[in-house]
Amino acid sequence: DVKVTQSSRYLVKRTGEKVFLECVQDMDHENMFWYRQDPGLGLRLIYFSYDVKMKEKGDIPEGYSVSREKKERFSLILESASTNQTSMYLCASSPTVGIYGYTFGSGTRLTVV
Amino acid sequence: KNEVEQSPQNLTAQEGEFITINCSYSVGISALHWLQQHPGGGIVSLFMLSSGKKKHGRLIATINIQEKHSSLHITASHPRDSAVYICAVRWYNTDKLIFGTGTRLQVFP
């Protein structure tokens, strides 16, 4: 069964901490994505990567960075967590553009206090 | 105006009822996805459509490219269908999805 695995379901961090959210996929997909989901706003794209060491900003990249050193792993980094980054974070992966669907992880609910 | 609009935002039904959730979009797309999100957060991809109709069990998804509209139908609804259903479109020649804000469905026994 193909999978996108996010390392934590729930995280509580303090304001100012550096936070790492990890995502691993076992499908050899080229594309990987990080979204955040907030009530009334739906899912919004933070960053995506279409290859190892390649990344592109999504719609709301401010306050975040990403790392993709290996094809199967895509990390989201909050350099200095703030309370407005309290949210549900979802990772997804897909093969190359065109005909294939997406696979989502089960999400990480991050609370910044 | 959002590029992907879903209706209704909230929907309640009695077990056994036929359910329809609608999605309209305003951009050119290469595919449309229907996703299901249960409480707790995980998202499951139900369908990916670029034309016509797809069926899986009690779920049916249709798309009309000319009218920029898609519908998700659930026949003989069941309480376990209670979830948020999200429509998302993929812009032409991009890897990005644009999401609707979701339809919250509650099916009561």
Image: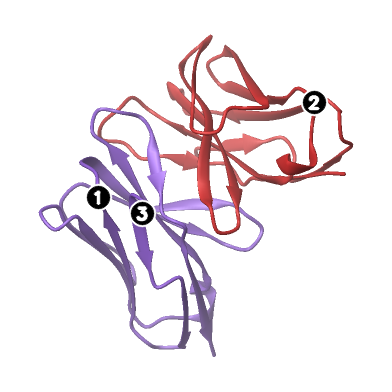
Chain colours: A red, B purple
What residue sits right under mark 1 in the picture? B26
Query: In the displayed structure, does residue B14 sit left or right of residue A106?
Result: left
Quarter of the image for the N terminus of chain B: give it. Answer: bottom left
Name the residue type under label 1: Ser
Residue shown at 72%/35% (left/top)? A7
Q: The residue tagged with tag 2: helix, strand or loop?
A: loop
**Is residue A67 visible from the viewing direction of this image?**
yes
Q: Are marks 3 and 2 in contact (CB under 8 Å)?
A: no
Q: Chain of mark 3?
A: B
Q: Is residue B18 above or below residue B48?
A: below
Give the Cα distance between marks 3 and 2. 33 Å
What residue sits right under mark 3 in the picture? B1
Residue B73 appears at what percent x and percent y? 31, 72
Q: The residue tagged with tag 3: helix, strand or loop?
A: loop
Give the Cα distance between marks 3 and 1. 9 Å
**Is residue B54 visible from the viewing direction of this image?**
no
Looking at the rendered image, the disc whose residue lies closer to the viewer, 3 or 2, is 3
Residue B100 appears at what percent x and percent y? 41, 54
Q: Are marks 3 and 1 in contact (CB under 8 Å)?
A: yes
- Residue B30, picture quadrant: top left
Residue shown at 87%/35% (left/top)? A15
Query: In the displayed structure, does residue B102 sit left or right of residue A12?
Result: left
Give the Cα distance between marks 2 and 1. 37 Å
Q: Chain of mark 1?
A: B
What residue sits right under mark 2 in the picture? A80
Residue shown at 80%/26% (left/top)? A80
